[in-house]
Image (cartoon, rainbow, N blue to C red):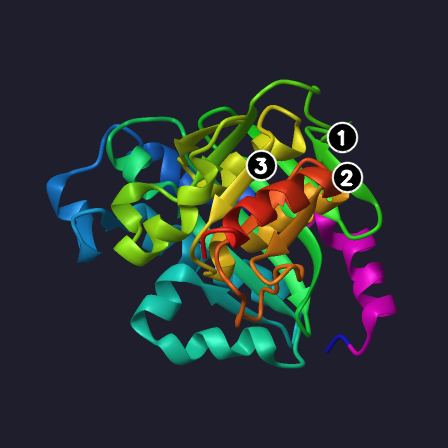
Amino acid sequence: MIEDKETIDEFLARHSADVEEAVRRAAAAEIMPRFRSLAAHEVDQKSGPHDLVTDADRLTERYLTKVLGDLLPGSVVVGEEAVHADPEVYEAIQGDAPVWIVDPVDGTRQFVHGNPGFCTLVALARRGVLLASWTYLPAAGQLATAVRGQGAFLDGERLRSGSPDPGRDLQVATSHPDYTTDAQKRALVGLWTDGVASRPCGSAGLEYLAVARGELDALAFSWEAAWDHAAGILLVEEAGGAHLTLSGEPFRITGGNSLPFTAARDAATARRVQGLLSGVA
């Protein structure tokens, strides 16, 4: 059982490569053989027609739950599909044990439609603090990683988010209309203004990666499920970015955030987007 932050650092020094290998193997075994080859019986709806789950989601999460739990005895796994089956699983994020936060296929709708814009997300946290993350793009074979205090990397190359070019419209990805309530849409309307170019988001994990790479200026999201945000939040932080909730506080993976929130390439951009959202909330 991991007892403190120092020993988790030691674990990561010894086993980060093992986590990377587990994520790659899970995708190779359960995701990619089904990409553009899904049978009808392998796809189900959860809350509605835009909320899909596939055998690839379930089997990838099962694989990672076993391997990650074995790698770090005493840890727990909070996966999207496990929480769907039993919402009480989510409470482990607030506990004392190290927790793996897993989204087996982030961008399931894209995956189902044969679009390569999906990824596998894994983050390691303890007591609400994000410690490491892995964002794997199976269709591209790319892996982005971050360890708290040690930077963010894509296939071994350091990521630096930088700052938006002065005078150019901010490029902002927002919660997709298919997944937002009327109230959430109203909360995001502040971004429909001069100087901001908004568009609906795709896979949350890939949008966070775009911010960390400096290809997208900011995100504005109206939901807080940890599996969608944990890996990306740390990736953006370690690339030099920042995140703020509607109340002006950083986003917390333990929940209770004032929504919507933003993650951006730098602190100034985060404050600018947060101000636009606050002005209409």
Residue 94, position as x, y percentages in the image:
59, 78
Inspect this view and state whether residue 64 appears: no
Q: Are marks 2 and 1 in contact (CB under 8 Å)?
A: yes
**Residue at x-position 85% and y-position 61%:** 10
Q: Is disc 2 placed on a helix, strand or loop?
A: loop
Residue 22, position as x, y percentages in the image:
57, 48
Label 2 neighbour load within 10 Å: few <14, some 14-19, many 20+: many
Residue 27, position as x, y percentages in the image:
45, 40
The amino acid type of the residue labelled 3 equals Ala
**Residue at x-position 45% and y-position 43%:** 190
Q: Tag 1 or tag 2, which sits nearer the N-term? A: 1
Rendered image: mark on residue 218: 3
The amino acid type of the residue labelled 2 equals Gly
Q: Is disc 1 placed on a helix, strand or loop?
A: loop
The residue to which callout 1 is attached is: 160
Q: What's the magenta region? A: 3-22
The residue to which callout 2 is attached is: 240
**Residue at x-position 65% and y-position 50%:** 243
Does residue 193 show up magenta in the picture? no
Q: Nearer the viewer, residue 7 or 215?
A: 215
Alpha carbon of mark 2 to alpha carbon of mark 1: how far?
6 Å
